[in-house]
Image (cartoon, rainbow, N blue to C red):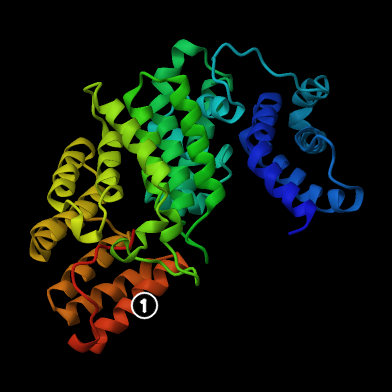
């Protein structure tokens, strides 16, 4: 990896959100801001290779993006007034900030999660604008088709424009009403890093590491918010298993087959301690419950020591809280391990989740464990038509080959779904 490439990767991670936010403040146009930020990064590829990496990459990118915006506005007669306004602000100054949020990126996330928008719109817009995820990635994370996700983003931006919603850092007393959306953004950012929804690599470590960093900042900012603590605990407990989730070929390793000596015991201990502290406040929420599930896995010395009845009960509680069909699929896995595959299949019979590959994949695994190989093969084929991540595709293909080979080719029963 060259120095220029490394600098560009670091600049995208550190500066993308700030550049876009500055352009939004200057122009009030979210689409123009994103396009000009993209142009600035594209121009940086050649310019930095030719002239060297600038001393302040963020300032270089912001100035380049601003100049690009001015060029665009000059070509647009309608933008004449805005052109004069933007041209009058040659050096963007940081706006007054009384939010108390001690991190630029987290502050921008609170800014983007405006309560005038629906929760889904806040999350989608923030992931797109500040985290730099593509509409396809966001759509897969939210289980929304990409065209529908794009329409959701357009509607959100139109609402901001028509309602004159300012892009402004909220004061400290307004942070709590935006916290649920910020928590959701951080969790989805981590999830995309922990289990990429597409591409050759299952892990995108830079995303999960950034989500954990921001969750730590948020926890320090809101030490009395149990769900902020619960989210940090959840991310740490899941991240602790990261290195054991893929083998040397990048193939997925099932939870039951993972080398537990490779789990990060420091992260597990910290996650459990955070979870205990959050639960003592007596206000359990979805992130705390998910962290409790992750703690059950993380503290089991061996796969056979896993407390599946406890995990199934926790998923039952989580299902009551969220009414989420994705949680229902996960609950079916846990119940299938605690009470047998038939019990898991009964739960799945009530789940309708079009396009979600883990629904047929989970059904296939339960059928495989029952020895119903023909039905399992059909379900694996259905899952393969939907999956977009290469590591998961290879795993499902192996499973399909095993059930097609018949009883002699089936693996040991009792394994959980990919995790």
Q: Secondary structure at mark 1?
A: helix
Whole-percent x, y for residue 241 in the image:
39, 53
Where residue 87 appears, as percent x and y from the top left, is: 83, 24
- Using residue 109 as the reference point, say whether residue 84 is left or right of it: right
Lateral position of residue 150 relative to residue 319, left or right: right
- Count of labels in the image: 1
Residue visible at 75% across and 54% down?
A: 5
**Residue beneath label 1, please?**
397
Residue at left 79%, top 32%? 59
Front residue of 30 and 162: 30
Residue at left offset 49%, top offset 46%: 208
Give the image quarter of residue 165. top right
Q: Position of residue 221 (x, y in %)?
A: 47, 20
Of the pair 247 and 349, the residue shown nearer to us: 247
User: Is 120 situated above or below 114?
Assistant: below
Q: Is residue 318 depicted above or below 195 in this figure?
A: above
Q: Residue 273 appears in which quarter of the rendering?
A: top left
378, above or below 289, in the image: below
Q: Position of residue 2 (x, y in %)?
A: 78, 57
Residue neighbourhood size for the residue with mark 1, other residues' Cα within 10 Å, grouped as few (<14), some (14–19), many (≥20): some
Q: Is residue 349 visible?
A: no
Residue 184 shows in this picture = yes
């Amino acid at each position: 990896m060259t120095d220029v490439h490394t600098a560009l990767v670091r600049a995208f991670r550190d500066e993308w959100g700030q550049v876009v936010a500055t352009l939004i403040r200057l122009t009030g146009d979210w689409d123009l801001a994103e396009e000009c930020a993209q142009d600035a990064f594209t121009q940086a590829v050649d310019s930095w290779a030719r002239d060297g990496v600038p001393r302040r990459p963020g300032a270089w990118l912001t100035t380049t993006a601003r100049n690009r915006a001015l060029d665009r506005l000059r070509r647009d007669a309608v933008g004449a007034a805005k052109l004069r306004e933007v041209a009058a602000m040659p050096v963007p100054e940081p706006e007054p900030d009384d939010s108390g949020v001690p991190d630029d990126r987290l502050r921008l996330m609170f800014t983007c999660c405006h309560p005038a928008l629906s929760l889904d719109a806040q999350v989608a817009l923030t992931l797109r604008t500040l985290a730099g995820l593509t509409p396809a990635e966001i759509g897969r994370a939210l289980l929304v088709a990409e065209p529908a996700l794009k329409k959701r983003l357009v509607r959100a931006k139109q609402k901001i424009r028509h309602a004159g919603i300012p892009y402004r850092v909220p004061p400290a007393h307004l942070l709590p009403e935006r916290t649920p959306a910020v928590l959701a953004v951080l969790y989805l950012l981590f999830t995309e890093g922990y289990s990429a929804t597409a591409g050759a690599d299952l892990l995108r470590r830079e995303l999960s590491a950034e989500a954990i960093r921001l969750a730590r900042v948020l926890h320090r900012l809101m030490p009395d918010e149990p769900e902020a603590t619960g989210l940090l605990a959840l991310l740490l407990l899941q991240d602790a298993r990261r290195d054991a989730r893929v083998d040397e070929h990048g193939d997925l390793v099932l939870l039951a087959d993972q080398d537990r000596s490779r789990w990060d015991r420091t992260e597990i201990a910290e996650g459990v301690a955070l979870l205990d502290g959050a639960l003592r406040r007596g206000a359990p929420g979805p992130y705390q419950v998910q962290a409790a599930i992750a703690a059950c896995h993380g503290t089991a010395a061996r796969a056979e020591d896993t407390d599946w009845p406890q995990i199934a009960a926790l998923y039952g509680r989580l299902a009551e809280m969220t009414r989420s069909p994705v949680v229902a699929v996960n609950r079916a896995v846990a119940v299938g391990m605690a009470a047998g595959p038939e019990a898991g299949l009964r739960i799945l019979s009530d789940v309708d989740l079009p396009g979600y590959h883990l629904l047929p994949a989970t059904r296939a695994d339960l059928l495989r464990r029952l020895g119903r190989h023909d039905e399992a093969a059909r379900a694996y084929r259905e899952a393969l038509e939907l999956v977009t991540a290469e590591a998961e595709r290879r795993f499902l293909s192996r499973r399909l080959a095993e059930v097609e080979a018949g009883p002699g080719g089936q693996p040991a029963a009792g394994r959980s779904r990919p995790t």
